[in-house]
Amino acid sequence: MPTKKETDVPADHTLFADITHMITESKALVAQTVNSALTMLYWKIGKRINDEVLQNKRADYGTQVILNLSQKLTTNYGKGWSEKQLRHCLRSAETFSEEQILYASRRQLSWTHLRTVMYLNDGIQREFYLLMTANEKWTTKQLAEKIDSMLYERTAISKKPEDLIQSELKGLREDNTLTPDLVFRDPYILDFLGLPDAYSEKSLEDAILSELERFILELGQGFSFIERQKRMLIDGEDFRLDLLFYHRRLKRMVAIDLKLGKFKAAYKAQMELYLRWLEKHEMVQGEEPPIGLILCAEGNKEQIELLQLHKAGIKVAEYLTELPDKNLLQQKLHMLIQTERKRLDNLEKNESDSV
């Protein structure tokens, strides 16, 4: 017969676990409440300062207001009210609407998240990073890394006309709708693979699989690995797809083919064959048709444009095995964005002329 002491142990353990869970949950809720209250407080302080400063046009007035306010608040409340902090508050009020602050609070974004984004000059970029942080639950460190790697400029949506970008961001904000153009990027930065100067497609594939977690982080949130060298038997002939992933939010398979050199027109037919086979043999009810991603060392923009790959559900992106100089990457991405937007404008103009 077990002693009373022995039978009490499981009960004590369960009691302790339950209460620990209650305390942890309560602490998390308190932290969220405090974070939301602080974020709104800082924004309101910034708005009040901004209203005061705008009433006086003297150039030195704003500086004097912030200096005096900082000294008085520090005397009353201690640390945390430096001139720098008050300037952050002011910047938040100048940058964000009350609606954006409320959204950030509801989605549990911290003041540090907002502070990381608020100094970006472009309003659409700020909105993109706020929404993606909320949806993908980035830490402040991850958010800073995404901005530093120029994620927005590398995302397909950045190459669209401004009204279409705003429309897709609105869908993400209001309906939680994630589109492929918010997911796919060009180029992908694969500097973590540690490849030698000369490498084969198999070496590239092996390196990706050995660093699969980091590769998925570069692809973005929502990707799950399914299979490498996916075998497809068509007319008695073996075909092999390099990598097969699934995207949970898009609800579709993502077929990835790796190429060493420049993009070639023949790659389109090969990818179309893979996608149609996957659609016929692997797609299940409730899923969207599979989408293809051809990763090349270098793109051929005119061929890609003429082939109208987007109509076939195929995307082409370059990959970089070494992290380039940021200024050079910025120039390249700026040129790509301008070129693509010009192409889309011309396409829209030609379609309207033909009507």
Image (spheres, grey):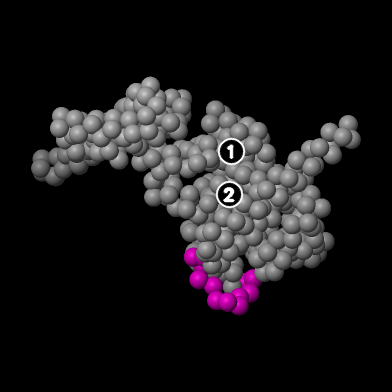
Q: Residue at x 55, y 37 (%)?
A: 124
Mark 2 and mark 1: Cα distance apart in space: 17 Å
| Relative depth, front residue between 302 and 60 | 60
Residue 38 found in image quarter:
top left
Looking at the rendered structure, the kind of residue marked 1 is Leu
Whether 255 is drawn above or below 78: the answer is below
Looking at the rendered structure, the kind of residue marked 2 is Glu
Whether 238 is drawn above or below 121: the answer is below
- Residue at label 1? 178
Magenta segment range?
191-202
Q: Residue at x 79, y 66 (%)?
A: 237
Q: Residue at x 65, y 66 (%)?
A: 297
Disc 1: CA contacts within 10 A as few (<14), some (14-19) or many (>=20): some
Whether 355 is drawn above or below 226: the answer is above
Q: Is residue 304 inside the magenta stretch?
A: no
- Give residue 233's position: percent from left, percent from top: 75, 61
The answer to whether residue 91 is left or right of residue 176 is: left
| Relative depth, front residue between 52 and 226 | 52
- Give residue 195's position: percent from left, percent from top: 54, 73
The answer to whether residue 290 is left or right of residue 123 is: right
Q: Please identify the quadrant where the C terminus is shown.
A: top right
- Give residue 190's position: percent from left, percent from top: 54, 63
Question: How many circles with numbers are drawn on the protein?
Answer: 2
Instruction: Of the two numbered discs 2 and 1 on the same chain, state the one appearing first in sequence.
Output: 2
Residue 4 image label: none
- Residue at label 2? 153
The answer to whether residue 258 is left or right of residue 149 is: right
| Nearest-to-viewer mark from 2 and 1 | 2
Question: What secondary structure is marked by label 1?
Answer: loop
